[in-house]
Image: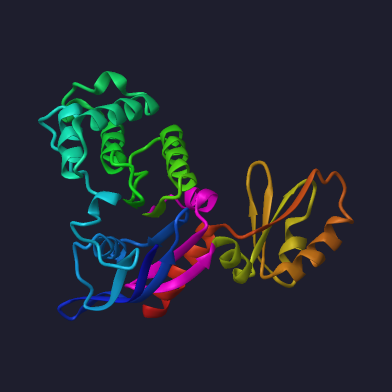
Amino acid sequence: MLEVKNARMLYGDLVAVDSLSFTIKPGDIFGLLGTNGAGKTTTFRMIMGLLEPTEGEILYNGGKVGYHNVNEIGYMIEERSLLTKITVKELMLYFGQLKDMETKDILERLDYWLERFDIVDYKNKKIKELSKGNQQKIQFISAIINNPKLLVLDEPFSGLDPINTELFVEVIRDFQKNGSMVVFSSHQLDHVESFCEELIVLEKGKAIIEGRIDQVKKDFKKQNIKIIGDVDIETLKAISGVYQVIENSNEIIVKIENEDVATKVFDYIKTCQHIMKYDVEQASLSEIFIAKVGGLKNEKV
């Protein structure tokens, strides 16, 4: 179990992380989100034992991260940290040996992951010869080569196309099924929403949203109604509780303040003809993120 208890990190007078607390249990996928400079990377470095919190503590299975348990952890940093003049095989032997792995085990796992990521032919190529997307795959493999029990991923989907992003998600889910703890950050909130159970959103080091995603969305109240059919836009806009109507090429999205407004919209829709779609959905994680973080930024202006 990973426990972050009232962690606070100061850089001089700058508060990078302020009284942050959360717990991750085996098999959990936990999202740590926020804008650039919100405190995500500092939090990851504290989890890894690279930084000591100014206040509070971070415990991995009841103790601090150190030489006695660091081999159980995988860490993928946002910036690429690959040695570009050596081959993929040489790089993995280097990283694997840092985790006290036997050469035989390193090569076996490397072959498995190269095949899983469809880059078998790159085993003996130098890192600098690979595309940015394939370098990202190699960096990911370097973080999971030791089959970690705690996997820390800082922007793992950066530079990936949708197909490879889904492949990364599949691998992360496999680690979850095997009981690993996964904590990650990402700006691709649609993927966070699709496979992450709990999250914290940071802004200036403080948690402004936290909890299970389903509860976060429920607490937000605002909802979207998606309509396909012949409706009058001005009539929709005039309904009390409707705060925006968006006309897309294939559907109309009606944004409402809460679920009670859906009844009013439906009463109007019942008077319309040729309605092919009427779906009420909770607000997306992206909308909640923009509303909460954007609202705070506007308050400071």
Q: Name the residue rendered at 48%, 69% in the picture.
A: 210
The image shows residue 120 at horizontal and vertical percentages of: 31, 21
Q: Name the residue rendered at 53%, 60% in the picture.
A: 287
Residue 276 vertical placement versus 44 (above, below): above
Residue 296 vertical placement versus 180 (above, below): below
Q: Is residue 53 visible?
A: yes
Residue 100 vertical placement versus 14 (above, below): above
Front residue of 237 and 51: 51
Q: Is residue 45 left or right of residue 279?
A: left
Give the total number of marks visible in the rendering.
0
Front residue of 234 and 217: 217
The image shows residue 229 at horizontal and vertical percentages of: 78, 45
| Residue 270 sits inside the magenta stretch | no
The image shows residue 123 at horizontal and vertical percentages of: 23, 23
The image shows residue 238 at horizontal and vertical percentages of: 74, 68
Place residue 157 in its image quadrant. top left
Q: Is residue 74 visible?
A: no
Residue 112 vertical placement versus 57 (above, below): above
Q: Residue furthest top?
A: 121
| Residue 198 sits inside the magenta stretch | yes
Q: Is residue 156 left or right of residue 283?
A: left
Q: Name the residue rendered at 43%, 39% in the picture.
A: 171
Q: Name the residue rendered at 30%, 25% in the picture.
A: 111
Q: Is residue 210 left or right of residue 138?
A: right
What residue span does the magenta drawing correspond to?
Answer: 185-212
Front residue of 284 and 58: 58
Front residue of 275 and 99: 99
Place residue 21 in its image quadrant. bottom left
Q: Residue furthest left?
A: 85
